[in-house]
Amino acid sequence: MRQPVIRASRVKRELKLGTQVVRALRGVDLTIYHNEMVGIIGPSGSGKSTLLGIIGGLDSPTEGSIEIDGLDISKMNEAQLTDIRNQKIGFVFQFFNLIPTLTALENVALPIEFAQVRRHKPFQRARDLLENLGLGGRHHHRPSELSGGEQQRVAIARALANNPPILLADEPTGNLDSQSGETVLAALKAIRAEQGTTVVLVTHDPSLASEMDRVLTLVDGRIVDGFGAEHADGQMNPKAATRLGEFGV
Ligand SMILES: Nc1ncnc2c1ncn2[C@@H]1O[C@H](COP(=O)(O)OP(=O)(O)OP(=O)(O)O)[C@@H](O)[C@H]1O
Ligand SMILES: [Mg+2]
């Protein structure tokens, strides 16, 4: 039996902007299983980042429920959500969000030093992670002394610092040239294979999406049916690819 690790039921998220109500998510249902690598695509403003934030406990739904490892996090308070994030989730963002004054090694060691239950020696673990991501020679470089692809791999190492079972990435290659993007994708695939991590990745890049096990398409705050880009052979369903083109994705 495949083990569900993320389950969303009728998730809605409304945001107030002055007097206007923005319906960012209008009823999302999804199940993501252990060790899957799932892509989320869709036009700008369709709710991708909002959905990822809700899955990761950075935000809560207005309605509906979201389960992480069988735990309903939708009604948790901020302290409980912080615990879930620390134990279960690693985040990677488009603009890396590294601390500019710290070296690569210090950036990765930081979340280990702050972990409630410290499972690793911070600098030893940080060294191993950077080594695994092909950054063995870059320990003492600060972010400004690294290429974009290298910075993003440091950010991935940091996201993995405390062994989260789930890695969430919001356009992790959105700011990278195609070659750096490939090194980041290779790193994510290796982590998924070696550590059994479940990966959910938002992207605008069809070639990156085609590398995922499965692709979910959001349009206007809903997952669109009929795009079922499930593919066993590594190819994106041609119909899905065509429809995406229509949306300018
Ligand atoms: N803090 C906020 N207040 C009000 N509206 C918001 C807020 N954050 C997002 N929105 C709106 O919610 C909708 C979904 O935004 P979201 O950032 O999830 O889209 P997205 O699919 O990630 O887009 P992009 O591809 O451009 O990153 C958009 O219409 C956006 O304008
Ligand atoms: Mg976004």
Image (cartoon, rainbow, N blue to C red):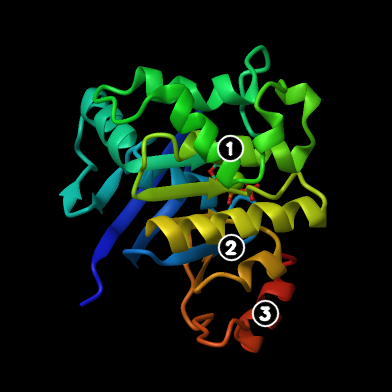
Considering depth in this image, is 129 or 223 the residue closer to the camera? 129
Between marks 2 and 1 in the image, the one whose residue lies nearer the viewer: 1
Side of 4 relative to 161 (left or right): left
Mark sitting on residue 130: 1
Q: Residue at x 22, y 53 (%)?
A: 69
Considering depth in this image, is 172 or 131 the residue closer to the camera? 131
- Indicate whether 95 appears above or below 213: above
- Using the numbered discs, state the Cα–Cα distance from disc 2 to disc 3 in whole angstroms: 11 Å
**Disc nearer the start of the sequence (3/1):** 1
The kind of residue on which mark 3 rests is: Ala
Task: Say if residue 8 shows up in the picture.
Answer: no
Residue bearing mark 3: 241
Q: Residue at x 68, y 21 (%)?
A: 140
Side of 86 relative to 219 (left or right): left
Q: Residue at x 32, y 64 (%)?
A: 34
Mark sitting on residue 220: none
Describe the element under mark 1 as helix, strand or loop: helix
Quadrant for the N terminus, please: bottom left
On the image, which quarter does residue 9 sit in? Answer: bottom left
Residue bearing mark 2: 41
**Disc nearer the start of the sequence (2/3):** 2
- Using the numbered discs, state the Cα–Cα distance from disc 2 to disc 1 in whole angstroms: 29 Å
Describe the element under mark 2 as helix, strand or loop: strand
The kind of residue on which mark 1 rests is: Leu
Considering depth in this image, is 160 or 2 the residue closer to the camera? 160
Residue 31: x and y, percent? 32, 66
- Indicate whether 222 appears above or below 69: below
Residue 203: x and y, percent? 63, 57
